[in-house]
Amino acid sequence: MLKMGLIGLGRMGKYHLNLYDSMRDIHLKALCDVDEKTLLNASHGNDVFATTDYTELLDKVDMVTVAAPTSYHFKIVKDCLKAGKHVLVEKPITTNLQEAEELFNIAAKKNLVLHIGHVERFNGAVQELKKIVRNPFLIESRRVGPYDERVKNDSIILDLMIHDIDIILNIVGKDVINVEAKGSKVYSNLPDFASVNLIFENNAVANIIVSRITQKKDRTLSISQEDTFVFLDYTNQDINIYRKGSSQHIFGERELRYKNEYITERLFVYKDNPLMLEIRHFVDCVKGNVLRMIPVEHELRSLKLALKVDDIISKKEGRCEVHA
Ligand SMILES: NC(=O)c1ccc[n+]([C@@H]2O[C@H](COP(=O)([O-])OP(=O)(O)OC[C@H]3O[C@@H](n4cnc5c(N)ncnc54)[C@H](O)[C@@H]3O)[C@@H](O)[C@H]2O)c1
């Protein structure tokens, strides 16, 4: 049985922790959080070693999940890899490409599995996309929701949009040749919403909107391709496919009416817990049972593009007027 350690027991760490008990081939051996109270609250009995210093758990485990704040990822992941541990680190792996590359180089040299927690890849609806999407022309993505003070110091691009960038890059499978981006501050000192336009080498276009100032949560992806329009809802893990669309203006005596007809197909999506599937995939890779879903050479494409978007926005960001 593989021995697991978990570093960082905040919001994301607790989701990981809650899933280990149901996984038969993992033995949770050690927990770490710098905050003693948090550590105590997450206590898992005498069998599980608990510490406020992650270096103390390294000799007790085979693999580690790192769910500490992003600014600590580089140091923690590097120490874990140097100690010969496989690592699943929450996204974003780092806020800097050179550091992320260094971590993957260490993992490669030591023959260790290093995964980034891009949990949306394991959303049942996203898994189905691979079977449906062929040569998309236009992609529209929305990931919006209400403001949360907790994330006011995080880049909305590295925190939210990186999910969309990751999925879109994987479904288009071509290089991006042009990026336009605009973001504005509303409540925090960083952009609270952003709009990004990507053009790919095959002329496919992606428009991505992220916002943490929108009262209604909405996480959707639409894809227009030849003969089909695909609409995906991340939250419900739902996909609808629209085919044979036609539209018509009907001129009556008193009014002008518009008719849009199409055939809709609601896809059956197997809905499992995406985080559970992500951990499962990591463990299966550690065991050597499966190949990683995204090859290492493609793993940092989304971070690279997200950093570029962040950079473009920071050079021309504005502030929206908030009226009291
Ligand atoms: N995959 C996703 O969809 C998703 C969603 C939310 C957050 N995240 C990522 O998860 C990570 C954690 O985010 P969160 O929202 O859980 O943060 P959080 O602030 O709720 O929790 C972080 C925890 O780490 C602890 N910590 C801080 N420094 C530490 C250290 N050196 N060693 C051990 N523990 C330490 C803190 O005490 C805290 O309990 C971030 O990288 C974030 O981007 C990913």
Image (cartoon, rainbow, N blue to C red):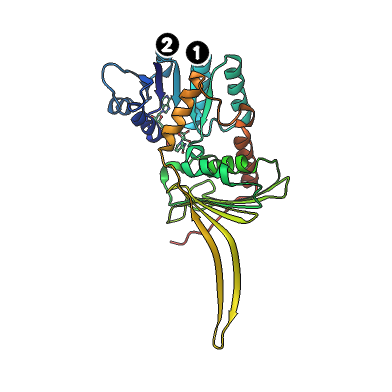
Which quadrant would the C terminus be assigned to in this image? bottom left
In depth, the one of 322 and 85 nearer the eye is 85
* Residue 144 as seen in the image, left or right of residue 56: right
Q: Nearer the viewer, residue 225 or 54?
A: 225
- The answer to whether residue 187 is above or below residue 105 is below
Q: Residue sitting at 38 percent across and 21 percent down?
A: 26
Residue 147 location, x and y as percent?
43, 50
* Disc 2 crowd, CA 10 A, few/some/many (<14, 14-19, 20+): few
- Cα separation between marks 2 and 1: 8 Å
* Residue 298 place in picture, x, y as percent: 63, 32
Residue behind mark 2: 59
Instruction: Inspect the image, locate mark 2, and give the three-letter code of the amino acid beneath it.
Output: Asp
Q: Quadrant of residue 97?
A: top right
Q: Which residue is mark 1?
A: 83
In the rendered view, tell whether residue 61 sits above or below residue 306.
above
Where's residue 130, x and y in %? 57, 42
Contact, CB < 8 Å: mark 2 with mark 1? yes
At a point 43% along the width and 56% down the height, the residue shown is: 216
Q: Ligand 1 within 8 A of label 2's CB?
A: no
Q: Residue at x 63, y 39 (%)?
A: 305
When asked about the image quadrant of residue 94, the answer is: top right
